[in-house]
Image: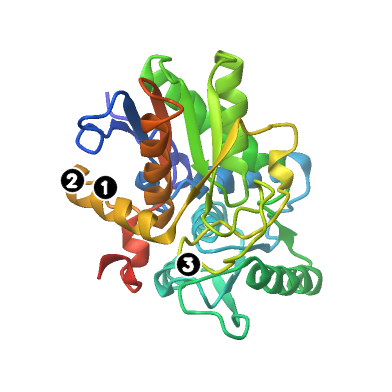
Amino acid sequence: MTKVAPSAAAAIGDTPLVELSRLTDGLDGRILMKLEYLNPGFSKKDRAALRIIEEAEASGDLQPGQTVLELTSGNMGTGLAIVCAAKGYPFVAVMSQGNSEERARMMRALGAEVVIVDQCPGSLPGQVSGQALRRVDEEATHLTESLGAFRADQFAHSGNRSAHYHGTAAEIWAQSGGVITAFCDFAGSGGTFAGCAAYFREQDAAIKCYVVEPAGAEALAGNEVVKADHPIQGGGYSMGQLEQLDGVEPDGFLAVSSDDAIKWTRRLARREGIFAGYSSGANVAAAIHLLKERETGGNIAIVACDSGLKYLSTDLWN
């Protein structure tokens, strides 16, 4: 029997779970990677975009024909552009000039209006700091008011966390046969970590869940931020608190250098055939570290957050 999705939005989710057997050769344990870049918008943020819009429709916060607006590094914006196109809502994305050009072009191709906010003085291309994100948030807040838009607000909306609780984590658990012993994730809004950690701990309280941050910008771990700028787009914003993490305490924090994130992203492509972005490499680096130390012999779940196609204009593939 054939199965035809009624729209692109309905095709979000049910991504494969793959064992990284070549990268873990010689190590005691397994890394299981959820290929979220195989969603229609090439990232895990498609799930949160769909859930936020559906919850807003159900609550009446989003009215037919109303403009949807959100700040984004590009992934959430792409997910929202797809969902809004499928449902008939105008969409405005607000993003920093520091994000890769591909992201803005993709959103525009999907019908979104993209507002680019200048980087902070002295910032390097391809890098977005917490200060730059605050600039984007200010512009997004202004535009939301002036347009009478619905702000998707991935940093606060419950749909972000619940998308990964009901979707990402539940799928990982079922696909793995319930063998997960640990989980780690590079923190952006914190929704993926919080949703997955909450679900996994309900299945087995012994499962350890770790937040991954860029080395030098480990604000969630409570460390002084000494290097706010880094190339790992989509997170590591030097924010000491994330609303999505409320009530979901990490079992630990892992710092990954930019060089290690790049190294493991490239190895992921060349040794496993998985073409993903910087944050996916950061997740692999963190999981490798865990297998060598705290989680030896375990089954560690991670997420391939987005596609390497979104970084062809950066130094990642040079």
Image mark for residue 206: none
x then y, percent, for residue 55: 69, 40
Q: How many marks?
A: 3
Q: What residue type is labelled 3?
A: Met
Q: What residue type is labelled 1?
A: Leu
- Asked whether the residues under the numbered discs 1 and 2 touch, taking CB atoms below 8 Å apart as contact, a structural biologist would say yes
Which residue bears the numbered disc 3? Answer: 107
x then y, percent, for residue 303: 42, 40
Q: For this view, does 146 lie left or right of residue 111? A: right
x then y, percent, for residue 191: 61, 42
The residue sitting at 51% across, 56% down in the picture is 215
Q: What residue type is labelled 2?
A: Arg
The residue sitting at 30% across, 56% down in the picture is 263
Location of the N terminus (image quadrant): top left
Helix, strand or loop at mark 3: helix
Q: For this view, does 318 lie left or right of residue 219? A: left
Q: Is residue 19 above or below residue 12?
A: above
Image mark for residue 271: 2
Of pointers 3 and 1, the one earlier in the residue sequence: 3
Q: How crowded is mark 3: few (under 14 residues within 10 Å), some or many (20 or more)?
A: many
The residue most toward the bottom is 121
Helix, strand or loop at mark 2: helix
Which residue bears the numbered disc 1? Answer: 268
Gap in angstroms between the C-alphas marked 1 and 2: 6 Å
Q: Tell me if I can see residue 133 in this picture.
A: yes
The residue sitting at 62% across, 50% down in the picture is 189
Q: In this view, does 242 lie above or below 3?
A: below
Gap in angstroms between the C-alphas marked 3 and 1: 26 Å
